[in-house]
Image (spheres, grey):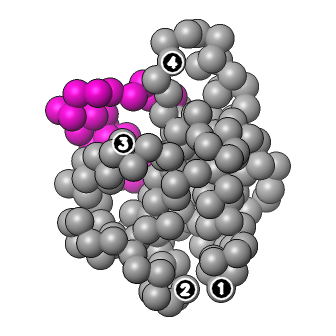
Amino acid sequence: MSSHRDRGAAYNGKMTAGAITDIAILVVEDNPDHRELTVRALAEHCDPARIATACDGVEALDFLFGRAAHAARDIRKQPRLVILDMKLTRLHGLDVLQAMRADPLTQAVPVVMLSASTEKPQLDLCYEAGANSVVRKSHDYEELRRKMRQVYDFWLTVNEPNRNSRA
């Protein structure tokens, strides 16, 4: 799990739980290049210290539910947004989403699914599992920047936050 203090600075595992309670966005992506580009695009609009990352579905749930390395985290304070890759290692993105929707602490947290798929049945599965939005992944960085700006603008500046993620 990473929380970026400034552009390019990685969380070193020694940050106190209190310092990471105001995470605005959790990015869950198993591809390190895609994860870094997504964070870089979001950091143009959001304080990088308020962006956390998880490299797979298990780590995402550990962060959200305060387990393992995140046991000291105040789970009453959830991110304003989770950006969740659909096809993750160890635990599929849809399984992460279903676990979030099944728990009262995370069921109202907005989730934007990232998918490389163009297949309508695959995208429909995201909505059926409770995704708030599905965004197709882009291999073009300028397109990714545009999409992440729009995601940020809507979910963190236009949308009213849910009760568990109000700053």
Residue at the spot of label 3? 34
Was residue 97 drawn as part of the magenta stretch in this picture? no
In front here: 32 or 82? Answer: 32
Magenta span main SS: helix
The amino acid beneath tag 1 is: Ala
The circle drawn on residue 17 is 2
Residue at the spot of label 1? 72
Secondary structure of the residue carrying tag 3 is helix
Spot occupied by residue 25 in the image (x, y as percentages of width and height): 45, 58
Secondary structure of the residue carrying tag 1 is loop
Dot 2 surroundings within 10 Å: few (below 14), some, or many (20 or more)?
Answer: some
Tell me if 85 is positioned left or right of 32 in this view. right
How far separated are the C-alphas under marks 2 and 3? 26 Å
- Indicate whether 149 appears above or below 18: above
Spot occupied by residue 33 in the image (x, y as percentages of width and height): 33, 45
Sequence order check: which comes first, mark 1 or mark 4? 1
How far separated are the C-alphas under marks 4 and 2? 36 Å
In front here: 70 or 77? Answer: 70
Q: Give the total of numbered labels.
A: 4
Q: Do the residues labelled 3 and 4 touch (CB within 8 Å)?
A: no
- Indicate whether 165 appears above or below 93: below
| Residue 15 in view of the camera | yes
How far separated are the C-alphas under marks 1 and 4? 36 Å
The amino acid beneath tag 3 is: His
Dot 1 surroundings within 10 Å: few (below 14), some, or many (20 or more)?
Answer: few
The amino acid beneath tag 2 is: Ala
Q: Are marks 2 and 3 in contact (CB under 8 Å)?
A: no
Tell me if 155 is positioned left or right of 110 in this view. left
How far separated are the C-alphas under marks 1 and 3? 28 Å
Magenta segment range?
Answer: 134-159
The circle drawn on residue 117 is 4
Residue at x 27% of width, y 34% of height:
144
